[in-house]
Image (spheres, grey):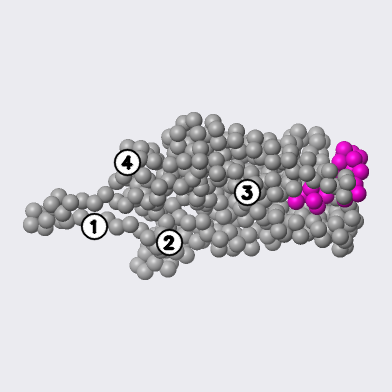
Amino acid sequence: MSDPTASAPVPTASGPVPPASVPASEVPSPASGVPAPEPMRDIPAGESTLAGTVNTVPLDPRRPHVDPARPFGAHVRTRWWAPLVVIPVVLIGMLILQVISTFVTIPYELFIGGHSTEEFTNADAPTLTPVMMLGVNLSLIATGLLALLALRVIAGVPWRAAFAVGRRFSWGRLLRTAGVMAPVILVFFALMELLFPSVPMTGAAGFGITATGLALLAITVLTTPLQAAAEEVVFRGVIGEMVASWIRPASLALVVGIIASSLIFGASHGSVDPWLFAYYTIFGLSGALMARITDGLEASIAFHASNNTLLFIVTALTIGDQGLTIDRSAGSGGPFMLVFIALDLVLVAIVWLLEKRRRARIAGRTPGSSWSAPELGQRRDQRRAAAVRPHSHRDIET
């Protein structure tokens, strides 16, 4: 759910394979005139190197499901038919879970919450109560878990591959990125109010604490970050990777996977307004670019979670006793969406700068290192390739 006006949404291989050992009899001796090669060793998970903290996982030639030499988004290799099963299972499962949520929450609101049928059928009346929002968020969180299960069981891919490649997922990086993004998002929210005062960013009741607002605030804080993370797992971590797995050249696979996942993300929000569809698609594209820049989902989760959480916090404090009205019909968007599209692109640039700064800082901490930030990226890729090539060089195309 990434609507600016109100938003709606790996299976482990058997483990690292140790490098093939070389019999002592086959190692050239110094006497033969050929220097003996330096013995290979595994890089322990989390060891600090020139390329940063890494968790190198060599590719198992018998089960080549994750290729750490390829960029995030194009690093999954699986059976050709697996995406044909995984993607429909995830998308249909998401639809079924949301239908179940609707059939549970609407009767509750009608018979216990004291709401009328007109409130859920009239486009000008509140259509999303706190209880309904809770149901939607829980259904999307469940969809994220379903996606990871499908990735593991159907495609045979480690579920961790949906979160990062060549390293471990970092909660610290996620929180730091969210801390940088949050003020920028709030500035753009304020800019939106100044440039387009006729398009409300807040509730009509003005600032105030009400029972409805407190309920919405609690649900937002407790479930919206998880809902946003689940959507990133579904679209950037699973669907994009599944589409890209059909294509062997890494660059082309990455481009196709990003475009496909972004379009599916945009379509999943169900808007027929061209402005809103463009916004949702570019939002998905921005998250995919962040994941590619950082080789993981931390930045895209921080982006999605910060956007949704801050939006609903502002709404909760200004909504009064009303529910939310979500209008995605034709004509509900407009040129004001350019402000939000600009926000997405600015945040992509910020993530790129943060990653460049991180690599430069790592270079500065490494004694005797003269690597530049781009060179560090190349060095990281070379280390990944070196970890993989001895095991299944014929199976990898970078």
Is 115 in the magenta? yes
Out of 241 and 115, give the one closest to the viewer.
115
Residue 131, horizontal then vertical, whole percent = 80, 51
Q: Earlier in the sequence, mark 4 or mark 2?
A: 2
Could you say whether the residue bearing mark 4 is in a helix, strand or loop? Answer: helix
Q: Which residue is mark 4?
A: 393
The mark found on residue 230 in the picture is 3
Q: Earlier in the sequence, mark 3 or mark 1?
A: 1
| Figure quadrant of the C terminus | top left
Residue 240 vertical position relative to residue 161 in the rendered view, above or below: above
Q: Which residue is mark 2?
A: 46
Q: Which residues are magenta?
A: 113-134
Q: Report how far apart the C-alphas of labels 2 and 3 lie in the structure.
A: 25 Å
Residue 113, horizontal then vertical, whole percent = 87, 50
Q: Report how far apart the C-alphas of labels 4 and 2 lie in the structure.
A: 25 Å
Front disc: 3 or 4: 3
Q: Which residue is mark 1?
A: 39
Could you say whether the residue bearing mark 3 is in a helix, strand or loop? Answer: helix
Discs 4, 1 touching: Cβ within 8 Å: no
Q: Report how far apart the C-alphas of labels 3 and 1 lie in the structure.
A: 42 Å
**What is the three-letter code of the residue carrying label 4?**
His
Residue 168 vertical position relative to residue 156 in the rendered view, above or below: below
Look at 35% across and 58% down and name the residue there.
43
**What is the three-letter code of the residue carrying label 2?**
Gly
**What is the three-letter code of the residue carrying label 3?**
Ala
Q: Earlier in the sequence, mark 2 or mark 1?
A: 1
